[in-house]
Each structure stands twice: as structure tokens, then as C-alpha cells.
Amino acid sequence: MKNAVTTNVADKEITLVRTFEAPRELVFEAFTNSVHLSRW
């Protein structure tokens, strides 16, 4: 897993990026299912 954080204080913008070595469908399920999301 790789993490990247970008901040721009002037525009009040924060971007978080996480890269996983996992099937896309599994990551989508984990991110969109509230049961899994609470463990995120």
C-alpha cells in the first residue's frame, strides 16, 4: 500500500490517495459498504 497526501492551504483543498495491490472490485466493495467502511 502506498499513501500520498497533497495539501493546498490557500485553496483549502486536501487530496488523499491510497494505492492497494488488490482487485478493484474488492476495494470498491470495502469503500462503498458501510460495514467495511467503518473499519477503513
Image (cartoon, helix red, strand yellow):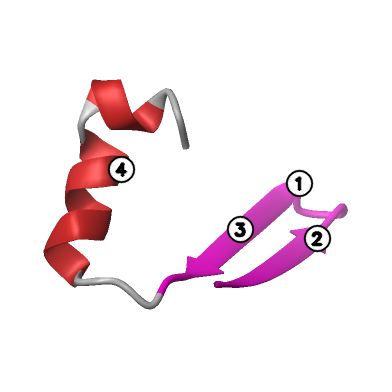
Label 2 crowd (10 A; few <14 / some 14-19 / many >=20): few
- Pointer 4 residue: 31
- Label 2: which secondary element: strand
Q: CA distance from mark 2 to mark 1?
A: 6 Å
Q: Are marks 2 and 1 in contact (CB under 8 Å)?
A: yes
User: Which residue extends farthest left?
Assistant: 25
Coordinates of residue 38 in the picture (x, y in percent): 42, 23
Of circles 2 and 4, the one toward us is 4
Prevailing secondary structure of the magenta residues: strand
- Label 3: which secondary element: strand
What residue is shown at x 68% (from left), y 71% (from top)? 4
What residue is shown at x 19% (from left), y 69% (from top)? 24
Label 1 crowd (10 A; few <14 / some 14-19 / many >=20): few
Q: CA distance from mark 1 to mark 4?
A: 24 Å
User: Which numbered circle lies on residue 27?
Assistant: none
Amino acid residing under circle 3? Leu
Amino acid residing under circle 4? Phe
Magenta-colored span: 1-20
- Pointer 2 residue: 8
Amino acid residing under circle 1? Lys
Of circles 2 and 3, the one toward us is 3
Label 3 crowd (10 A; few <14 / some 14-19 / many >=20): few
What residue is shown at x 27% (from left), y 21% (from top)? 35
Q: Is 13 left, or right, of 31 in this rendering?
A: right
Quadrant containing the N terminus is: bottom right
